[in-house]
């Protein structure tokens, strides 16, 4: 479960700290779901979050590993 003040990374590589969680309506699925506001003013949903941690270094380390792997291809 993601909480306020946790750092997250999205599937598009955006990294931010969760500052607010709201219930939002997803028009595609016709369901209500949690929507996460990040400190960089981006909003995201759980299915787009690929990494979460209370420490930003752990989120950044995984991002760096993925970039290195992509560079090897």
Image (tube, helix red, strand yellow):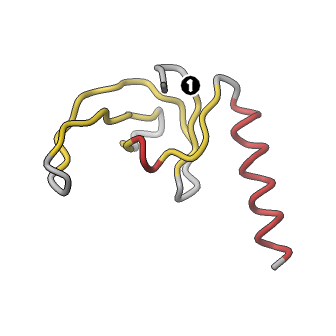
Q: Tag 1's secondary structure? A: loop
* Closer-to-camera residue (40/57): 57
Give percent across and percent down for residue 58: 75, 34
Question: What residue is disc 1 on?
Answer: 6
User: In the displayed structure, does residue 31 sit left or right of residue 48?
Assistant: left
Q: How many marks?
A: 1
Give percent across and percent down for residue 18: 47, 28
Give percent across and percent down for residue 47: 42, 47
Residue at image coords 55%, 50%: 14
User: In the displayed structure, does residue 58 sit left or right of residue 29?
Assistant: right
* Closer-to-camera residue (35/16): 35
Q: Quadrant of residue 34?
A: top left
Residue at image coords 13%, 49%: 30
User: In the displayed structure, does residue 19 sit left or right of residue 24?
Assistant: right
Residue at image coords 81%, 54%: 65
Q: Quadrant of the C terminus?
A: bottom right
- The correct choice, above or below, for 67 with respect to 43 in the image is below
Give percent across and percent down for residue 49: 50, 45
Q: Residues within 10 Å of mark 1 (few under 14, many from 20)?
A: some
- The correct choice, above or below, for 45 with respect to 73 in the image is above
Residue at image coords 78%, 53%: 64
- The correct choice, above or below, for 72 with respect to 8 in the image is below
Seen as rendered, the residue at the extreme bottom is 73
Q: Quadrant of residue 37?
A: top left
* Closer-to-camera residue (53/31): 31
- The correct choice, above or below, for 11 with respect to 6 in the image is below
Seen as rendered, the residue at the extreme top is 4
């Amino acid at each position: 479960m993601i909480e306020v003040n946790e750092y997250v990374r999205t599937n598009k590589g955006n990294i931010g700290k969760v500052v607010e969680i709201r219930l939002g309506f997803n028009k595609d699925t016709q369901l209500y779901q949690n929507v996460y506001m990040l400190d960089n003013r981006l909003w995201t949903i759980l299915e787009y979050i690929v990494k979460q941690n209370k420490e930003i270094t752990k989120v950044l380390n995984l991002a760096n590993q993925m970039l290195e792997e992509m560079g090897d291809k």
